[in-house]
Amino acid sequence: MTVTAEKKARILALYDEHRRKNGRQLPPVSGVEVRPNVRRLASVGAPREGGRVLNLSSAVVRAGEPAWQVLAPALAGDGASLQRLRELTRDLVHENRRTVGRRNGQGPGPEVPPPPRCQGTPGQRSFLRLLVDCLRHSSGYGELFPSRLHLRISRRMTRALGSSSVRGGWRRITVAERLFRPGLEDILWETVKHEVAHLLDEVTRDDGRSSHGPTWRQWARRLGARPERLCTPAEVTRIELARRGSTVSNSPPSASSLREEACQEEALQLQGRISKCRHPGSGLHYPELVQEWLKRNRADPPGSS
Ligand SMILES: [Zn+2]
């Protein structure tokens, strides 16, 4: 979206005015960047050469002066201003969301983002891919899975176990790297089902959103996930123990490291087809349902030799 310099100047002037009147609680910004965001209406960017920029959803720009007036107070944490900003931009955000949705259904659109940085090993990536593939092929809802879906493993994700989001026309599921430990496979599997439930909730709802409300809970049940927002205290303890390197295994002993190396090589060679990799990385074991699915669908099931 092209935004005139005049509009940008007016937005910046209102922002500066708020800073002057309110003891500079917001950092100074030197520019405005506009994207068709559907999740975040506005944010102040990190400091960089030339100063911080104000990142705005195109919905905020298009909503005009009334929205620009409440922008800075909303960023400063004023609840009423944020509420007003949401009301003023709601329809425009929906419009953006529909545009993103359309891009989802087509071939490469004009806005193809680079693949997200995945911090997992090839073995971990193929393990995650296979869990999602199993849900895609055995849940009965495979046709609802978007063709443009990125799977990502994050080491920085420490407060959550997973997330489902939209980036430039791509759906993205992120899972915390700390779950890829022997003994935590059940929690990882639960997290994948939880996030895929969000994904299917998002693509089937008119507003394209997903909370932990009734529609998400319905998807969670369909996928065999616990229809609950948080993991259990016992799971939190096991994740923490695994992080500290203690043994938490409630599954059979891990696969040999030789197999793991072979697997990683295979994964690298196959590139786009890494889900064919039969032996998971890091000594991980497939959840029972995934093992069953593999046995039914592969002549050479995992573990057979
Ligand atoms: Zn959730």
Image: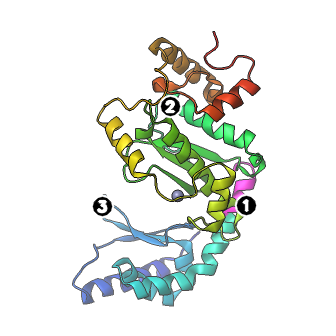
Prevailing secondary structure of the magenta residues:
helix
Between circles 2 and 1, the one closer to the viewer is: 2
Could you tell me which secondary element the residue under label 3 belongs to? Answer: loop
Please state which amino acid type lies under the numbered disc 1.
Answer: Arg
Residue 124 marker: 2
Which image quadrant for residue 288? Answer: top right
Marks 1 and 3 sit apart, C-alpha to C-alpha, by 34 Å
Q: Is residue 118 visible?
A: yes
Q: Start and end of the magenta stretch?
A: 100-108
Which residue bears the numbered disc 3?
47
The type of residue carrying mark 3 is Pro
Residue 157 percent location from the top left of the image: 40, 48
Residue 264, horizontal then vertical, whole percent: 52, 21
SS at circle 2: helix
Q: Earlier in the sequence, mark 1 or mark 3?
A: 3
Q: Please give the name of the residue rendered at 73% of the width and 45% of the height, measured from the top-left corner.
A: 139
- Kindly state the secondary structure of the residue where label 1 is placed: helix
Q: Which residue is mark 1?
A: 102
Please tell me which residue is depicted at 53% across the width and 58% down the height of the picture: 228
Q: Position of residue 80 (x, y in %)?
A: 42, 88
Depth check, front residue: 36 or 212: 212
Q: Earlier in the sequence, mark 2 or mark 1?
A: 1
Q: Does any portion of residue 169 appear in the rendered image?
A: no
Of the residues under marks 3 and 2, which one precedes in the sequence? Answer: 3
Most distant residue in the top direction: 305
Badge 1 crowding class, 10 Å Cα cut-off, few under 14, some 14 to 19, many 20 or more, is few
Q: Quadrant of the N terminus?
A: bottom right
Q: Position of residue 169 (x, y in %)?
A: 63, 56
Type of the residue with mark 2: Gln
